[in-house]
């Protein structure tokens, strides 16, 4: 009875959240999708719990308990504990629905991966963005993944290939600081920071592709030095040298579009095809914002 009352309280709380005027339509669709899936799973688990309780009651009421019945009872109690833990986890996810721009289950998995690799990557729960530090992910002036970064990119690809994540497009966006390229060889390879930022985004995309993410789910872009997250100093900024990954609803599918877009966190400009790097025109003035590679 306690479980049903808890679920009823959550059922009242979330519709109240949907009615708040400042929440966007896409966010409301996200909350509803998360709530609906979690609610259905909780109800199913609760039904399994009731069946397990009946089984336990029968086993405990056996007139001539033997070793086999005792073993069955122990297994049933263990199963019941696992079901209760699963219900508790889903209720936690349900209570947090709407606090993240992507499903809570996916957000938790990304957060755990970032916590396990703090020197290489971070995860922003508010925006749903994953960030790789370029100084650790790449060598200076290079666009090939370092040996220590490749396994983490592969592990991230596995998370992004999960059923809960498969409804999202993976947008990979490269950034640099404002230090111009001076090395002649690097300049010949990439031209400028636009080229370097996009080449690094492509390198991460290729890592995802090698790990099994379809190209149809991915796009890449490079912003060069024009989207800093902190002011650049005389030697630029390590924080500005980064590659970010955004998850947005896949286009053309109503069910996916109803799920949980992180569109407000991701770049809004048109992105280049996943394996394309094309020289940029001169950037627009700062008040208009930079173009992407087309």
Image (cartoon, rainbow, N blue to C red):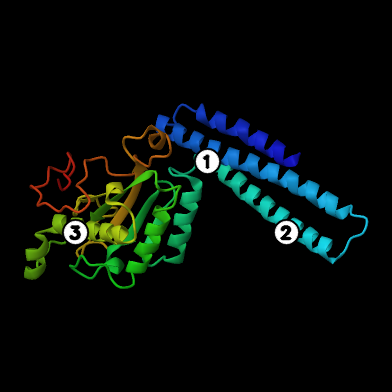
Measured along the vertical axis of the image, is residue 132 above or below residue 83? below
Q: Callout 2: helix, strand or loop? A: helix
**Residue 253 placed where, x, y %?**
35, 35
Question: Mark 1 — residue?
Answer: 97
Q: Identify the residue shown where x is 48% and y is 55%.
A: 109
Is residue 60 shown left or right of residue 7?
Answer: right
Q: Callout 1: helix, strand or loop? A: loop
Is residue 13 shown left or right of residue 161?
Answer: right
Spatial separation of the CA atoms under disc 3 and disc 2: 52 Å
User: Is mark 1 in CB contact (under 8 Å) with mark 3?
Assistant: no
Q: Which mark is residue 179?
A: none
Spatial separation of the CA atoms under disc 2 and disc 1: 29 Å
Question: Mark 2 — residue?
Answer: 78
Q: Identify the residue shown where x is 52% and y is 41%.
A: 97
N-term-proximal mark, 3 vs 2: 2
Q: Nearer the viewer, residue 141 or 247?
A: 247
User: Is mark 3 in CB contact (under 8 Å) with mark 2?
Assistant: no
Q: Quadrant of residue 189?
A: bottom left
Is residue 147 shown left or right of residue 10?
Answer: left
Q: Identify the residue shown where x is 27% and y is 57%.
A: 205
Name of the residue lying farthest toward the bottom = 147
Q: Which mark is residue 199?
A: 3
> Callout 2: few (<14), some (14-19), or many (20+) C-alpha neighbours within 10 Å?
few
- Quadrant of the drawing holding the N terminus: top right
**Residue 268 placed where, x, y %?**
26, 40
Q: Callout 3: helix, strand or loop? A: helix
User: Is mark 2 in CB contact (under 8 Å) with mark 1?
Assistant: no
> Callout 3: few (<14), some (14-19), or many (20+) C-alpha neighbours within 10 Å?
many
| Dot in front, 2 or 1 | 2
């Amino acid at each position: 009875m306690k479980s049903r009352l808890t679920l009823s309280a959550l059922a009242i709380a979330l519709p109240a959240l949907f009615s708040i005027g400042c929440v966007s339509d896409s966010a409301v669709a996200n909350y509803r999708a998360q709530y609906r899936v979690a609610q259905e799973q909780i109800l199913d688990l609760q039904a399994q719990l009731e069946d397990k309780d009946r089984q336990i009651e029968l086993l405990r009421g056996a007139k001539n308990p033997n070793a086999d019945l005792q073993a069955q009872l122990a297994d049933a109690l263990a199963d019941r504990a696992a079901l209760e833990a699963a219900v508790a986890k889903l209720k936690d996810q349900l209570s947090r629905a709407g606090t993240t721009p992507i499903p809570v289950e996916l957000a938790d998995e990304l957060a755990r991966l970032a916590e396990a690799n703090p020197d290489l990557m971070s995860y922003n729960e508010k925006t749903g963005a994953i960030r790789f530090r370029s100084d650790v992910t790449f060598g200076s002036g290079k666009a090939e993944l370092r040996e220590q970064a490749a396994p983490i990119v592969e592990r991230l690809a596995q998370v992004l290939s999960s059923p809960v994540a498969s409804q999202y497009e993976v947008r990979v966006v490269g950034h640099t600081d404002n230090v111009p390229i001076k090395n002649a060889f690097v300049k010949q390879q990439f031209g400028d920071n636009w080229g370097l930022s996009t080449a690094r985004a492509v390198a991460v995309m290729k890592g995802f592709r090698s790990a099994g993410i379809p190209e149809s789910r991915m796009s890449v872009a490079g912003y060069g030095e024009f989207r800093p997250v902190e002011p650049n100093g005389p030697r630029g900024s390590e924080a500005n040298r980064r590659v970010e990954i955004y998850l947005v609803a896949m286009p053309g599918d109503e069910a996916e579009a109803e799920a949980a877009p992180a569109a407000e966190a991701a770049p809004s400009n048109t992105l280049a095809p996943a394996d394309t790097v094309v020289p940029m025109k001169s950037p627009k003035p700062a008040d208009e914002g930079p173009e992407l590679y087309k």
